[in-house]
Image (tube, coloured by chain):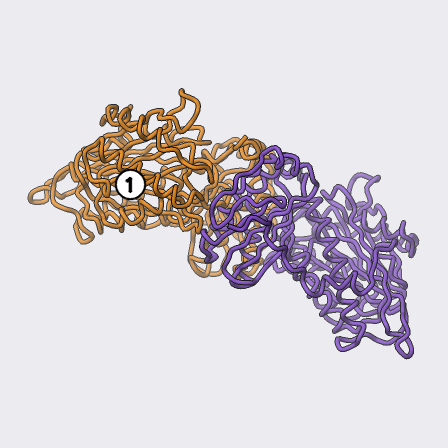
Chain colours: A orange, B purple
Amino acid sequence: MNPGTIAPIPVPPVADGMEEFGFAPCTGGICAAAGIRAAGVHAGFRKDPARSDLALVVADAPCTCAATFTTNRFCAAPVQVSRPRAAAGVAQAIVLNSGNANAATGDEGVRTALASTEIVASVLGCDPEQVLVASTGVIGVPLPLAPYETGVPIAVSALASTPEAAHAAACAVMTTDTVSKEVSVEGTVPTGAEGAPVTVHVGGFVKGSGMIQPNMATMLCVLSTDAPLTAEAAHTALLAAVKTTFNHVTVDSDTSTNDSAFLLATGAAGGEEIGLGSDAFPAIAAAIHGVCEALARKIAADGEGATKLVTVDVVGAATVEDADTVAFSIANSPLTKTAIFGHDANWGRIAAAAGKCGVAFDQYACDIDLMGVPVLRAGLPVPMDEEDMLRRFEQPEIPIVISLGAGTACSRVWTCDLTHEYVTINGDYRT
Amino acid sequence: MNPGTIAPIPVPPVADGMEEFGFAPCTGGICAAAGIRAAGVHAGFRKDPARSDLALVVADAPCTCAATFTTNRFCAAPVQVSRPRAAAGVAQAIVLNSGNANAATGDEGVRTALASTEIVASVLGCDPEQVLVASTGVIGVPLPLAPYETGVPIAVSALASTPEAAHAAACAVMTTDTVSKEVSVEGTVPTGAEGAPVTVHVGGFVKGSGMIQPNMATMLCVLSTDAPLTAEAAHTALLAAVKTTFNHVTVDSDTSTNDSAFLLATGAAGGEEIGLGSDAFPAIAAAIHGVCEALARKIAADGEGATKLVTVDVVGAATVEDADTVAFSIANSPLTKTAIFGHDANWGRIAAAAGKCGVAFDQYACDIDLMGVPVLRAGLPVPMDEEDMLRRFEQPEIPIVISLGAGTACSRVWTCDLTHEYVTINGDYRT
């Protein structure tokens, strides 16, 4: 029997680089990157005039873009419009609304999404093909065009490159989110003349609190960087980051119809173009990964009704797929999540959740640590100090580590507890 | 657009036979079958002396048995003991306790499970190899043997073939169940001399309320029949029934470590032995299926904290696997389940749950009926009368039907809503 705690999960290679490459937090959110302006206003998608519902993020000129979208078969109209446009790798603006998802709205919904981008293009004076669109809110209700007609001119006149403008955009996409979610970092990469250092930024905001088990991206995420990325480099860095961050968050196992993540790379920091083979690429990719991970943790921590951020680490799996399956099985287990809400160190539910998902392992090779305390070794309980466990439950973050003893693969998933407030929020949402 | 409701799911062929074969409800529960006695007593697994915690079901002589068990990798000690014994096809007694699952208890737990069957065999005067054992309750706590030593003699002296004794056994295995769950049916099969009719019975009880997404069987189920089934016929009928009944119930997606379903066939009704090829087999199989379906519905209706029984029918799927995947995706969707709790006809969440699970279909070929009302046709909303929907939510059973327009396969899954009470029960369970 191993008396110590399980060795921690190795941080994904690309993620441990952000600090190593010298990136550190900075202010500015989505506007931290040079060449980006943002705004968030009330346009009328929501009835409450005090609540903003239209966000606009604009680059000073057409620039590199990358995006990923939901895999839900019921994909929303804005996803159908944005997906092919983003694939072109160039965009200038992203318009987002809250209060209505424009999903299950058929051809009329697609026409509205297209028309919204035409309004934005007309007011900004840019190509409608370079305007991307995203929506979040209730499903199956026609999205009116009028709020765009009145709201977009107001938003365009409010555009600014300030932290306040970035914050206004982050707030305008909130639905059941209780806090806005912004992150930005700053670092230098050797991409100037003769390898001179150039200061670059990566920033962004995200919204998401319920219907969250993203599969390609989280609910809605907008990232920007002033690094001069090629479209291929932007796409590769965004996909790699989303795969192990937003796609590893689950609040309630429900994959949205509208999940979208966008990255605009303005190049305004200057310096040489950064492609996949550039010396500066690993640093930028690490920064994008770091920003996505920080935003992903904010989603889990602000899950609907959540009181705890829960980190599930699976180590010792035979394959990464096995590790992912076990991690999600634990993270989506209502019994595990309600036990955490109840400050109940009921590791039996964690073991049962690991065992139920069809992944092969020997229960007598399995170890579990809960909040840093060994609770299961070789399939057998380790006596716990219940008072000590109760004290540990006072922390805002609850780590679960399970070792399957079946190999060397691992996975990390973020989730939250399941609370009365979740039931209240979702029992009353539409009414 | 189809203005009518979706054609109902065809009832599984074996299930529509119970009434057709003349089986009808009768009294007696597990004791409806001749040759079966039962008891339920307080043995001391629980502290509260007013709460029974030991159930015993005994055949008058060694008889045919069949059983199915959990697929959870963390399978409990009693499952490890009962699985090989049941495979022999002969048994005389089943001993069940509540209050402690004897799971994650290692070799000591297996020794306790073996010893419990030796105590039962000694008091009954039968072969320990013909005693099966099952446990339900908290995981990871050593199961004491003392309650068997004092409780089994009391239970044996209480054994009776009355409805009251059957009810006592059904009550002794309850955990968070709010009601006991018993069903029994009676019918005749042409298995006497020269095809003369013989009256046979199928009855049983089940327990299960949380940690319920059985995969092989429900939490704990004991069935009996006085029909003279061969071991092969008993096994085939039980497996066929469990597959589309208990294995299609989900309360919270958590598959237990202890799921077990047992069938004892005493043959005490008399008549010719019934094998797979007997004329009487389809009727008996239909009766076993009917009893399992009725018990499965009782589990879903009594799901932890449930206020509604929810029936999810998926039709028009390309394959049965697709139909099952979509049905479970909807039935396990926390957003769908909380909406039902909130009497919110939010079919968008049903559509999103269908779309998220990786099954291929065209959203514009998809129809949804909620509580008998068409709400989605060809992927587009059908206007609802919200007042009418609120009235329909007053019913105890909420039917959801979704047609994928991708083929002819179908599936039915039973679940319940997700309520505050579920969170309360599972946030406080161990404390």
User: Looking at the picture, how far across and down is residue A228, in whole percent?
Assistant: 17, 43
Q: Quadrant of the N terminus of chain A?
A: bottom right
In the drawing, does residue B224 fall left or right of residue A376? Answer: right
For disc 1, the marked residue is A132
In the drawing, does residue A372 fall left or right of residue B397? Answer: left
In the drawing, does residue B341 fall left or right of residue B292? Answer: left
Q: Is residue B202 visible?
A: yes
A44 or A261: nearer the eye? A44
A283 or B183: nearer the eye? B183
B218 or B88: nearer the eye? B218
Residue that lies at the very extreme toward the left in this rendered image? A194
Q: Above or below — where is B125 with respect to B248? A: below
Residue that lies at the very extreme toward the top in this rendered image? A50
Task: Please tell me whether mark 1 sits on a helix, a strand or a loop.
Answer: strand
The subunit letter for the residue under badge 1 reads A
Counting every numbered tag in the picture gives 1
Under mark 1, the amino acid is Leu
Q: Quadrant of the C terminus of chain A?
A: top right
Q: Above or below — where is A233 with respect to A187? A: below
Residue at coordinates 22% horizontally, 27% vertically from top-left? A161
User: Looking at the picture, how far across and down is residue B335, in whole percent?
Assistant: 54, 41
User: Looking at the picture, how far across and down is residue B1, in whole percent?
Assistant: 50, 50
Q: Is residue A27 visible?
A: no
Residue at coordinates 48% horizontally, 57% vertically from top-left? B359
User: Looking at the picture, how far across and down is residue A95, in whole percent?
Assistant: 30, 35
**Quarter residue A154 falls in:** top left
**Quarter residue B408 falls in:** bottom right
Residue at coordinates 80% horizontally, 65% vertically from top-left? B21
B380 or A176: nearer the eye? B380
Q: Residues within 10 Å of mark 1 (few under 14, many from 20)?
A: many
